[in-house]
Amino acid sequence: MSDHPASPILLFDSGVGGLTVHDALREVLPEAPVIYAADLAGLPYGTKSEAQIAARVAGLLGRMAERYQPRLACIACNTASTIALGMVRDVLEIPVVGTVPAIKPAAALTQTGTIGLVGTEATIRQAYVDDLERAFAADKRLLRVAAPALVGAAEAKLRGEPVDPALIADVRDRLAAQGAGLPSIDTLVLACTHFPLLGEEFAAVFGRDVAQVDGARGIARRIAQLLEGQPFAAHGPNRFVVTGPVAGARGLEQALAARGFGAAEAF
Ligand code: DGL
């Protein structure tokens, strides 16, 4: 029963990126039971086709909702949300919150009027992003680049591995080339939930004057609003489940324990 006090919030991503949404959620709902599902067997999403992503995400979320009986599901992934949010809402009977590029807050923040958006290949080509640009940044310049290598870099960083700054410098250079002749970028939309895990690395390359904007806090607030007044039962460690072999989560032990998750489990 999805309105039972022990019923969890289901957070879903292709990998560990959605932990950035989890961290923001913890600030507003510290007591809520959470099941975090990482589709490691499907990672990365950003290089897949729309059809592959939509079928996979809708199918998996349907099965996960059946197994875990969540009270709410959050697709903590820009790629999956910009492609499959509507479809997932059709499949599930609970509220579904998506994660879409934070173009609106970035447009409100920029002074120079030039915004850089960094996402996966699949995200930056979505009509959903065109619509957000039209609605909120029509009078700004939105430069988009894909940075698929940063997804792996964020996964590795959370497993304790170093990040090659050249990967971020490449993003900076491609944005600069696209924006030649325009006022400089002062606001960066991190349009992949993995990327805020590299916030320090982005700051080191872009400088601290360039504001980094992502949707995590807004999503957390939206979830809290939808669940307002609902009781949460006391519970044990939160659960971290992965598709594919559980060994895929090797190296994440510290990051998971620090966030109150038990050992990774297979879905
Ligand atoms: N974390 C995902 C996002 O927000 C995508 C990573 C991937 O390519 O799987 O877009």
Image (cartoon, rainbow, N blue to C red):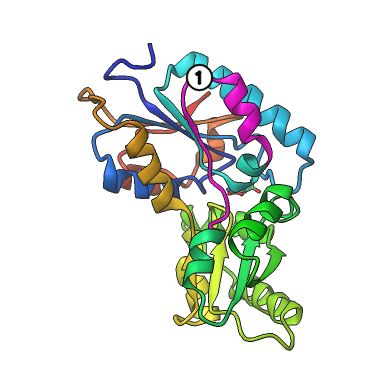
Image location of residue 67, percent across then percent down: 49, 15
Q: Is residue 110 magenta?
A: no
Count of numbered circles on the image: 1
Q: Nearer the viewer, residue 204 or 140?
A: 140
Image location of residue 53, percent across then percent down: 71, 36
For residue 29, side relative to residue 190 (left or right): left
Q: Which amino acid lies under the numbered mark 1 shown in the image of this protein?
A: Ala
Q: Nearer the viewer, residue 136 or 174?
A: 136
Q: Which residues are magenta?
A: 83-102
**Could you say whether the residue bearing mark 1 is in a helix, strand or loop?**
helix
Q: Is residue 221 above or below residue 227?
A: below
Which quarter of the figure has residue 4? top left
For residue 87, side relative to residue 3 (left or right): right
Q: Nearer the viewer, residue 153 or 72?
A: 72
- Name the residue: 32% across, 31% down: 227
Image location of residue 90, percent across then percent down: 61, 22
Task: For residue 261, say whether it is visible.
Answer: no
- Name the residue: 59% across, 40% down: 14
The residue to which callout 1 is attached is 65
For residue 164, side relative to residue 262 (left or right): right
Q: Residue furthest top?
A: 1
- Name the residue: 26% across, 25% down: 230
Which quarter of the figure has residue 208? bottom left
Image location of residue 193, percent across then percent down: 53, 52
